[in-house]
Amino acid sequence: MIEIICTACGKDALLKREPVYEGFTKTGEELSCASCGHVYASEAEVPFKEQRKVEIFTDEDRPDQVDVFTDDEKQRVCRYCKHYVVNPFAQRCDLHVTFVEATDYCADFENPR
């Protein structure tokens, strides 16, 4: 819901958007105050009520980026292997013909590229 401070009645009210039709063709929108019905000519004319964003945390409060895996470890995960096959029911390795998980490791890893 979009809140405005109406210039006609001075109240905090909601902005009402109604489509304007010419026959069956939409030609625009009519913007009006839901409280008193005052019509605004354009969206630039509408006095929107400012919403203050409350900042609880600053950038200093955010944790540092955590890297769990090194680049070498990421390269040997089954998910990135050439033989990794996914279907809706199971994930499997075509090389070893076994069921695997995406986060499993394998000594026979092959890059798909």
Image (cartoon, rainbow, N blue to C red):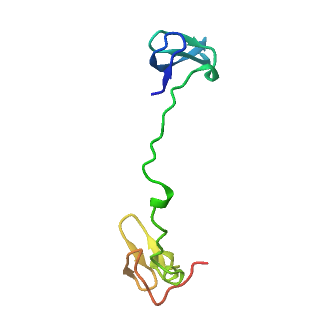
x, y percentage for residue 98?
37, 81
Instruction: Quadrant for residue 87, please give it.
Output: bottom left
x, y percentage for residue 18?
52, 17
- Looking at the image, which residue is at 46% across and 46% down? 55
Whether residue 80 is situated above or below residue 35 in the rendered picture: below
Whether residue 83 is situated above or below residue 24 in the rendered picture: below
- Looking at the image, which residue is at 50% across and 20% down? 5
- Looking at the image, which residue is at 54% across and 80% down? 71
Of 65 and 60, nearer the camera is: 60
Quadrant of image for the N terminus: top left
x, y percentage for residue 36?
47, 9
Instruction: Using residue 113 as the reference point, say whether residue 18 is left or right of it.
Output: left
Quadrant of image for the C terminus: bottom right
Instruction: Using residue 92 as the reference point, say whether residue 43 is left or right of it.
Output: right
Of 96 and 111, nearer the camera is: 111
x, y percentage for residue 7?
55, 14
Instruction: Quadrant for residue 103, please give it.
Output: bottom left
